[in-house]
Amino acid sequence: MRTSHAALAAALALASPLALAQDAAVDAALADVAPADAAPAPACTPDPLPADRAPQVTVTLGPEQPRVGDRVVITYRFRYRSRDRVEFEPDVVAFQQPAIEMDYARDQPERDRSSRPADNGYVTTDVSVAVQPFKVADVLVASLPARVNTGDEIARICTPEVRFRVRSVFGNAGHPAPKDVTDPVEVRIGAVVLRNAAIALDVLFAVVMVTLAAAGWWRARPKIVPPPPPPRHPYLIARDALEALAHGDLLSRGHTKDYYDAISDVIRRYLGGTRGFDAIEMTSDEVIAQVRKSPLPGVPLVEVERLLSECDLVKFAGYVPSHEDADEILRSAVSLVERGRPQVLPADGAKPGSGGAP
């Protein structure tokens, strides 16, 4: 019997803490679901002041209908006598409301506490605070204390409460009613025209792109370049050059030096092309030395030396030959070239030495 009474007493002792814990949990849950816009107890009580000394405080909101995530600027404007001074420092805690996910914004407006003249001997001062709500809710910022110094006394004044609703970015009507619609408008013909125009533009664009691609490929394709024609035989070049000099007018115009210089160049190119050396850049002695190593059949070396020497006399020594001497030097050059003519005359454009003299 004593055992039963002891067990009953222990059960009652354990039941009391459990019941208290359950009641506390229920109270906490009810507190969490309490409306966010419940009016808190007034936190500011103003000191009595005469009507002509009490500053006027107004509040503006920007934007007027804020949405979730907006930066909301609350501006307090104090209007007071010019000889008075108002001091107001916003309480950051009043603007941080975790229950409705509203924070004190990091980017705060610049606070210019200087006064600006108003009218009738009054001035105004603006103090702005930026907040940022992240939840749809009704916001209530409690009245905040400020001080006014009238010169005779320092009194407390209170700002008005700030109330505004944070709206959703998606819509704010819970059950929107259907709106009247206008009569249907026939748009099929215009839509068909626009569709056809769009298709035509697409086709034109495709044609232009294909054309540009084909043109790029055509320009970039490897081209077959025909081989250059073979060089002409030195005999043919010298023969044509001497014939041009014979029909030219260098002598009739008095350009004897140019005439002899041209004959010398023809003979030099002929000798160098036949025996494989650059005679234009050589002196006459160097040309004679090269011809001595590889003489031309039927052309005495003495004749080559005499022709080049006569040309050098006119070119460098200032010797002025007669017309008979000029004709004679041309005949000597033609004779030298013709005696060095290859045994088998090459076709015009054949390579030097093909079928030529040994």
Image (spheres, helix red, strand yellow):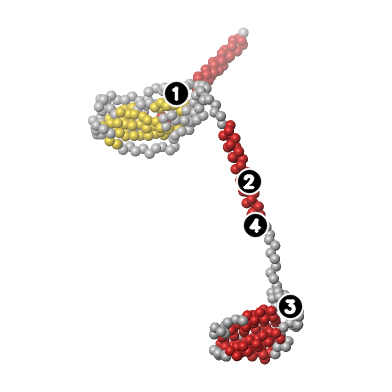
Q: Which residue is mark 4?
A: 219
Q: 338 above or below 9?
A: below
CA–CA distance in space, label 4 to label 2: 20 Å
**Mark 2: amino acid:** Ala
Secondary structure category for the residue under label 4: helix
Secondary structure category for the residue under label 1: loop
**Mark 4: amino acid:** Arg
Q: Earlier in the sequence, mark 4 or mark 2?
A: 2
Q: Residue at x 54, y 85 (%)?
A: 254
Mark 2 crowdedness (10 Å alpha carbons): few <14, some 14-19, many ≥20: few
Which numbered mark, 4 or 3, is in the foreground of this view? 3
Q: Earlier in the sequence, mark 1 or mark 2?
A: 1
Viewer can see residue 100:
no
Q: Earlier in the sequence, mark 4 or mark 3?
A: 4
Secondary structure category for the residue under label 3: loop
**Mark 3: amino acid:** Pro
Which numbered mark, 3 or 2, is in the foreground of this view? 3
CA–CA distance in space, label 1 to label 4: 77 Å
CA–CA distance in space, label 3 to label 2: 58 Å
Q: 337 above or below 228?
A: below
Q: Which residue is mark 1?
A: 37
Q: Which residue is mark 3?
A: 346
The answer to whether the residues at label 1 and label 2 have Cβ atoms under 8 Å apart is no
Q: Residue at x 67, y 85 (%)?
A: 334
Q: Residue at x 65, y 86 (%)?
A: 333
Q: Quadrant of residue 236?
A: bottom right
Which numbered mark, 1 or 2, is in the foreground of this view? 2
> Is 281 placed left or right of 148 in the picture?
right
Q: Position of residue 238 (x, y in %)?
A: 66, 81
Mark 4 crowdedness (10 Å alpha carbons): few <14, some 14-19, many ≥20: few
Q: Nearer the viewer, residue 62 or 309?
A: 309
